[in-house]
Amino acid sequence: MFSTLKNAFKDKEIRNKIYFTLFILLLYRIGANITVPGVNAKAITQVAQTGLVPMLDTVSGGGLDNYSIFSLGVSPYITAQIVIQLLQMDIVPVLVEWGKQGEVGRRKTNQVTRWLSLAVAFVQSIGITLGFNALTQMGLVKSQSWQTYVEIAVIMTAGTMLLTWLGDEITDKGLGNGVSVIIFAGIIARLPRGLYQIFKEDIINNSASDRIQGILFFIAIIIAILVVTQLVTWVEQADRRIPIQYTKRATVSGSESFLPLKVNVSGVIPVIFASSFIITPATILMVFQKSQGDQQWYKVMTSIFSMQTTPGVIIYTLLIILFTFFYAFVQVNPEKLSKNLQKQGAYIPSVWPGKDTQDYVSKLLMRLSTVGSVFLGLVALLPQLATNFWNLPSSIGLGGTSLLIVIGVVLELSRQVNGLLMKREYVGFIR
């Protein structure tokens, strides 16, 4: 990794992309510390232990701590992406048709996604503002008029759309994967504070007799992080190589062509999707906190969409598993892959071209996604269950999710930089 960075900074074009990405992330961190006008940010500390706050902080990079203009992060945009991609699966004919139109269709789909994310952001901002204001004793909102709530919602919605645009700028002019990089930067920014809180609670604030136990616990957490990091990195880099042969190409002796499919085809996207899918209903429920808080239906729904309860954690894990299968077929479309192989005069040995190739790739994706989904689910589930059962800090519970996102984004950025370096070498060779 260090040699890759060293080589990247030697190339002016790649170096500019890195600097541009860092500049955008700096703007993001500045915005994450600008409190929304008309809000008493100190009041948010009273509800800091609710299940929604840690989860929102995971995708907003701690922006909710001071109720910043980026409090929602890119969660509404991700939720809108999920809805649009689901509707493109032969549900809405117009969206299905746009999916077949290439670049033109992609632009139309992106436009609809942005309008939908605008609506989701507005609803979420109203929801968390009303909900947190009802939960805090000192009052989150200084003025209780409906105009103030609308103003706050507009500012937070604008912050989300600005953050989405910054992510697009990273995708176009930076290192790519802008939305994922934004989430990654937020998690990294919160990491030192999270470790310090654990260190403070278990060592500094403990008595002398319990301090040794606290030190051992802190060391155990560090070791666990390193072990999980190594395991996640190993699984994320593992792939299944499908041999490919060409009918119109002379095969060089000793050479072999293959199609690599990652064991975890979906990468870290299912974790991000599942997090956003949990956040949206939870924020909407907060609107009814004051009027329906004692009703049975509200208690059941809150339990389902809370990361502080066992049912909520299980549903969150099931969402990760479902999105792993769903996004694997979005990333690798067996039908398109089969057609592309035929156009290139290529085939998989012992498999007939066309429908048989499509079925073969589909079955292989199902097997790979089974392994990948179970892995992602366990990494996200076990720390959260440990937090719920043993009353550990909430930052540990979401540590599995955060680690998955951080490692996945770092590996993808490394592949992006390596691809740019390889492209530079080929261009130099052609010239």
Image (spheres, grey):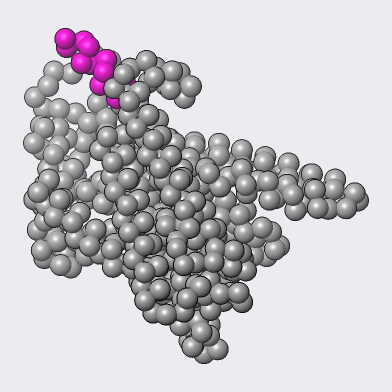
Q: Is any part of residue 364 visible from this angle?
A: no
Q: Nearer the viewer, residue 158 or 124?
A: 158
The quadrant in which residue 284 appears is bottom left
Q: Residue 65 in the image: x percent, y percent?
A: 55, 58
- Magenta stretch? 420-431
Q: Nearer the viewer, residue 28 or 223?
A: 28
Q: Nearer the viewer, residue 390 or 372?
A: 390
The count of marks equals 0
Q: Residue at x 13, y 60 (%)?
A: 96
Q: Which quarter shows the C terminus?
A: top left
* Residue 356 highlighted magenta (yes or no): no
Against 418, residue 363 (above or below) is: below
164 lies left or right of 393: left
Q: Is any part of residue 65 visible from this angle?
A: yes
Q: Nearer the viewer, residue 92 or 211?
A: 211
The quadrant in which residue 79 appears is bottom left
Q: Residue at x 79, y 48 (%)?
A: 203
Q: Residue at x 14, y 61 (%)?
A: 95
Q: Residue 244 in the image: x percent, y percent?
A: 22, 31
Q: Residue 272 in the image: x percent, y percent?
A: 41, 54
Q: Residue at x 46, y 83 (%)?
A: 288
198 lies left or right of 32: right
323 lies left or right of 353: right
By secondary structure, the bulk of the magenta-drawn segment is best described as helix
Against 322, residue 286 (above or below) is: below
399 lies left or right of 347: right
Q: Residue 261 in the image: x percent, y percent?
A: 32, 39
